[in-house]
Structures are given as C-alpha cells and as structure tokens.
Image (cartoon, grey):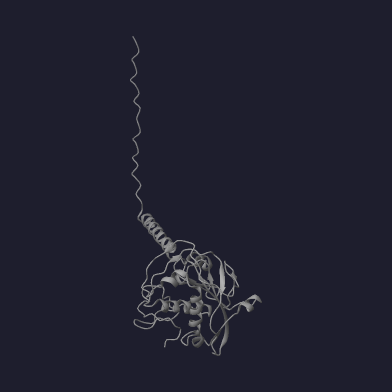
Amino acid sequence: MPAPTPAPELTRTPPRRVVAPRTMSQQRRFRLRRTMVGGGLLLVAFLLLKILGPDASGAEGMSPSGPTGGATGATAGATTSASAGQSSPTNSSDSATSGASSPVAKVVQSGDGKIAVLAVPGADTGVKGTTKTFTVEAEGGLGLDLPQFAAMVRRVLSDPRGWERADGVHFVALSAAQLAQGTVPDIRITLASPDLTDTLCAPLRTMGEVSCNQNGRAIINAKRWALGVSYYPQLDSYRTYVINHEVGHSLNHPHAACPGPGQKAPIMQQQTLGLQGCTPWPYPVAS
C-alpha cells in the first residue's frame, strides 16, 4: 500500500511593512522658509549694491575712510602745462537733458586720458587765514571750455560766501614755476570725463554720473559740469555748488543732511542726488 503523499507545506509570506511618508516637521519647515527669505533678501541687497555702489557717499563721493587733507597723485598723473585751450571731443556724445538754463552740451564718455594743469586767471584774495594751495586741472578731449572752467574755480574760491569765510582759509593758486620746482598742492581740482572720473574715484562707484573727492582731490565729472541737474535752476549755480561741495571734502567736511523743508540745503548735502525738501544753495555761507 503506497505511503500517503504529504501535503505541501504552506509558506507564510510576512506582511509588507507600509512606511508612511515622512512629513516635514514644523521646525524644519520654518527653517526652510527662513532660508528662502534670507536668500531673497541677499539677492535684493546684491542687486541694490550693483546699482547704487557700496556706500551712499560714493554717489557724490568722498573716500571710504573720510576725506583727507593733502592731495596726492591718482591714477592719471598731471602735467604742468602753464595753460590749456579748449579741448576737442574724441568720442561719442551724451545728449541727456537737464533743467539747467544753458543749452544742452555734448558730453563725451571718455577724453584722451591725459590731465594737464590749467592756468588760473586773476589774483588770490587778500583774506587772512590758513593757506591752502590749489591747482586746476582738466583731461584733454572733453570738448568743453577749459579756460572757463579754470576761471570759474577762481571765482568760486574767491567768493565772500565761500570757504575762505566759512573755514578761515586762504586759497593760493600755485604757479607753473612752483609746480616745476616740485611744490605739491593741498587741493587739486580736476575736470574729468565720466570714464576717467570712475577711475580716479575708485573704489567709490560714481557710475559715470557723479563727482567725488578722493584723497583730497576734487574730481568734477564733466557730464555733471556740462548738464547740471534738473532741480538747479541755473547751470552756473550748480557748477558753483559742485566745486564748493568737493572742495569742502578736501577741507575735511563730511556730508550733511537737509535741516528741514524749505530751508537752504547745506553745501555738504549731496544736492546732486536730491534736495530732500530743502532749496538749492551753492555756498558754504548761508547768507
């Protein structure tokens, strides 16, 4: 009799373990949101930095460590030419408009990169005070009236509403002979193209638009000299302001704020960037 066939052995399959999807904890979700918001803020700050530069003062500049007294050499050197005539343009022009009263001038983006000392007409005043020697310089190839620039610097520095009265100083123009002998001016007032302004003002970010003071050197952007700004009613008034403002940095004056709506803007207010409720005023002395 045949042996009975054993029944097949049933193998038990262990039940599958169902793993529930991991849910993000509330704390982790908070950290993730915080990281995303922080990253967005950093991106916005980076974009603003690219547009406005590292410091608000760079817009109408002074050196990051504050203005200093003695003028020193900068990227482009100066030659001691006793006089220089009107320069001729060598580049394309910028015909942006402004509210200045004079006809809109053509502005080159770059000159020839060579700076020459200009002859300063007229005589020093008889004001008693601490002597501050100065020179007036300009880049070639700007297409601007350079003798007019030198004459206006003389007129502004000699004005009774200027720094001689406000600070008790006496401005003395250095002669070509003195420069040839190696005399270094306390203040250099330089008219430069937008491109050269950016170079001389670095690390300030003037963006080809505004002027600055770097190491006691008053660098006037030819674009602003030619066009002014819309809220200065007269171009000559704006030119007076920008000379006095940048020379003020050479005399160790920091920036100032508008004292109140309707009041005269202090000369060290960054009036090129706006008046903040003040009225334009181009002199250090209020009256």
Residue 201 visible in the shown view: yes
Q: Is residue 81 left or right of residue 20?
A: right
x, y percentage for residue 111? 51, 65
x, y percentage for residue 138? 53, 71
| Residue at horizontal 57 percent and vertical 86 percent from the top | 130
Looking at the image, which residue sits at the far top? 1
In this view of the protein, which residue sits in the foreground, 36 or 286?
286
Quarter the N terminus occupies: top left
Depicted 17 relative to depicted 231: above or below: above
x, y percentage for residue 14? 35, 33
Quarter the C terminus occupies: bottom left
Exactly how many numbered labels are in the figure?
0
Residue 215 in which image quadrant = bottom right
Depicted 19 relative to depicted 2: above or below: below
Residue 188 in which image quadrant = bottom right
x, y percentage for residue 283? 44, 83
In this view of the protein, which residue sits in the foreground, 112 or 204?
112
| Residue at horizontal 41 percent and vertical 61 percent from the top | 47
Residue 62 visible in the shown view: no
In this view of the protein, which residue sits in the foreground, 148 or 182?
148
